[in-house]
Image (cartoon, rainbow, N blue to C red):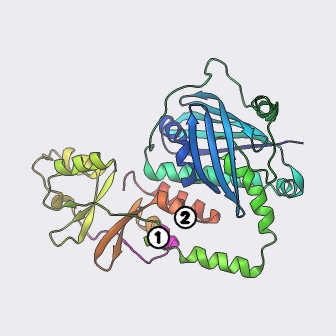
Amino acid sequence: MTTKVEKSVLVNVPVSTAYNQWTQFEDFPQFMGGVKRVTQLSDDRLEWVAEIAGVRRQWTAKILEQVPDRKVAWAATEGATNAGAVTFEDVGGGQTSVRLSLEYEPEGLLEKVGDKLNVVQNQAEKDLERFKAFIEAEGYAAGAWRGSVNEDAPVGSPGVEAAAASRGDAGKAGVSGAAVAAGVGVAAAAAGAVAAATTAKKSTDADQATYQQHRRGATARDIMTGGAECVSVNDTLADAARRLRDLDVGAIPICGEDNRLKGMLTDRDIVIKCIADGRDPASTTVSALAEGKPVTIGADDSVEETLTTMKNHGVRRLPVIDGHDLIGIVSQADVARNLPDHKIGDLVEAISSAPSNS
């Protein structure tokens, strides 16, 4: 007996941005629970490596249909019987509806128990929320593949029969002992969560306490991007704009002559506070926009403290300070990768309250 999952999420980015990020399959481990590595073997074949409940699994999937800004459909070729599609709909106002349709076949007692507990559905929903947090925090896609796969032969939302047909000479897709999904997108981690959740039911109270202590121990230092580059207060805004372009970022720290943090500069600041006011960015220095005390986070502050600071100040990126030294930058995407599932809603709220590129 198969199970079908239907989940959707509204993301606050244009459809091309959402779709382009989804085509970067090798970035999936950044927002997908349990997935350790994705390797794109060809335009229509992917190899997955996941670790679920301490068990490492490897499998492949085949893309059956891919249409830019509209759809990605897949079927398993080995490792788990599952198939489905992710569709993208432009709903206007710079927003996109991302919808997941998945059909899979649970196998064995653990998988069937997990299926009854709706573990796969819950994991799919959480991973869609993580994708939303990831792409909204960045505001742009990390890359794009705009090619098509079988665009002239649409497959609809394929079910498990498509997985059986795509196995090749063997004639059907196998089902792994842990029922790890081999889908493209959120579904990959979702079905694998069955084994993780059912195994977790056996954890002792001491195991849970140790896990919670580990989660509380994560700090801004652990999740930040180190080696942050600065612009000087004496640089012109034209120079700063070129630095933003070369680094492919929307915000950069401002440092004084003493190398201490003086503020944050965004591309939006240059447009709104300089160009829109009729100033010349070639002659206006960065110091003109280094106003007020910058919002920072201490290197040893927790991930949850980092999230709270972002929410309270409506910012998407925080400079990380160790003593008086700037040692890195933590973004909402960094936070998204390190939050427990029950805190993802808080991150989405923080993203919604922060202006673009803040």
Residue 212: name its quadrant.
bottom right
Label 1: state its secondary structure: helix
Q: Which image quarter is the C terminus in? A: bottom left
In-image side of 357 versus 162 (left or right): left
Nearer to the camera, 66 or 256: 66
Q: Which class describes the residues within 10 Å of circle 1: few (<14), some (14-19), or many (20+)?
A: some
Q: Is residue 341 above or below residue 20?
A: below
Q: Residue furthest front?
A: 169
Q: Which residues are magenta?
A: 293-308
Number of marks drawn: 2
Q: Is residue 87 above or below residue 336?
A: above
Nearer to the camera, 281 or 240: 240
Distance from disc 2 to disc 1, alpha carbons, whole Å, reads 10 Å
Amino acid on which disc 2 is placed: Asn
Spot occupied by residue 27 in the image (x, y as percentages of width and height)? 52, 48
Q: Is residue 323 above or below residue 198?
A: below
The reply to whether dot 2 and dot 1 touch (C-beta < 8 Å) is: yes
| Residue 69 seen in render | yes
In-image side of 139 versus 5 (left or right): left
Q: Earlier in the sequence, mark 2 or mark 1?
A: 1
Q: Which residue is mark 2?
A: 338
In-image side of 157 versus 281 (left or right): right
Q: Which residue is mark 1?
A: 222
Q: Which class describes the residues within 10 Å of circle 2: few (<14), some (14-19), or many (20+)?
A: many
